[in-house]
Amino acid sequence: MTGPFHALGLPASAELTDDDIRSAWRRIAAATHPDREDGGDPAAFAAAAAAYTLLRTTAGRGEALADLSDRAGGRVPDGPVPRTKTLAPAAATIAWRIRHGRPVRLAARLLAAAAGGTLAVAATGWQPASAALITGALTWLLLTGRHDLAARR
């Protein structure tokens, strides 16, 4: 497998530091530089230089790991296996929070938001600003309704 980590002789790991990358680059550059008496290895030097340019920052290492993850089907080689996310636990959590929260107040807020959006559109007719009025009613519902989802203490 070729890649920036392989070009510097490093494992693909998020725990690599700037010093790890720099020391690997210096080691490879000293061994492959084209100005060496034996001519070095220009291709290996160019690959290592490109790898160092990418990996020398934390953001660059993150991008390289993400690229490896994409190529490996969502998994970094020798990295942890990602958990698959399903909607079932989230739906169960929301249902539990509604049941143990304040369902009557939440229903009242939902009705108020629906009525507010409907009345605004009925009063002014459908205009470009109608979508903004409905969005405002939904935003109010989200900002105030989250308190009704919390379990009582």
Image: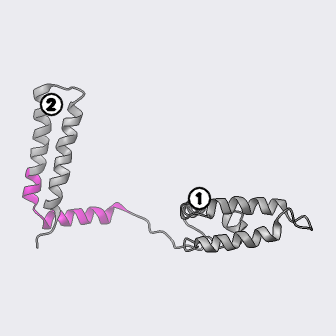
Locate residue 99, reporting x and y percent: 14, 65
Disc 1 secondary structure class: helix
Which residue: 64% across, 70% down? 21
Disc 2 secondary structure class: helix
The disc labelled 2 sits on which kind of residue?
Val
The image quadrant where one finds the N terminus is bottom right
Query: Quadrant of the rendered structure where residue 115 is?
Result: top left
Query: Quadrant of the rendered structure where residue 30 is?
Result: bottom right
Locate residue 51, reporting x and y percent: 68, 62
Residues under numbered marks 1 and 2 in contact, where contact means CB atoms less than 8 Å apart: no
Q: Which residue is outermost to the right? A: 38
Q: Is residue 25 left or right of residue 73?
A: right
Read off the residue under disc 1: 67
Locate residue 19, reporting x and y percent: 62, 73
**Nearer to me, 113 or 59:** 59
Instruction: Indicate which disc, 1 or 2, sits on the residue closer to the N terminus.
Output: 1
Query: Quadrant of the rendered structure where residue 72 is?
Result: bottom right
Read off the residue under disc 2: 121
Q: Is residue 1 left or right of residue 106?
A: right
Magenta segment boundaries in residue numbering: 86-108
Is 7 included in the stretch rendered in magenta?
no
The disc labelled 1 sits on which kind of residue?
Asp
Which residue: 19% across, 26% down? 126
**Nearer to me, 94 or 25:** 25
Label 2 Cα neighbours within 10 Å, binned few <14 / some 14-19 / many ≥20: some
Q: Is residue 107 above or below residue 17?
A: above
Which residue: 10% across, 62% down? 102
Q: Is residue 140 above or below residue 133?
A: below
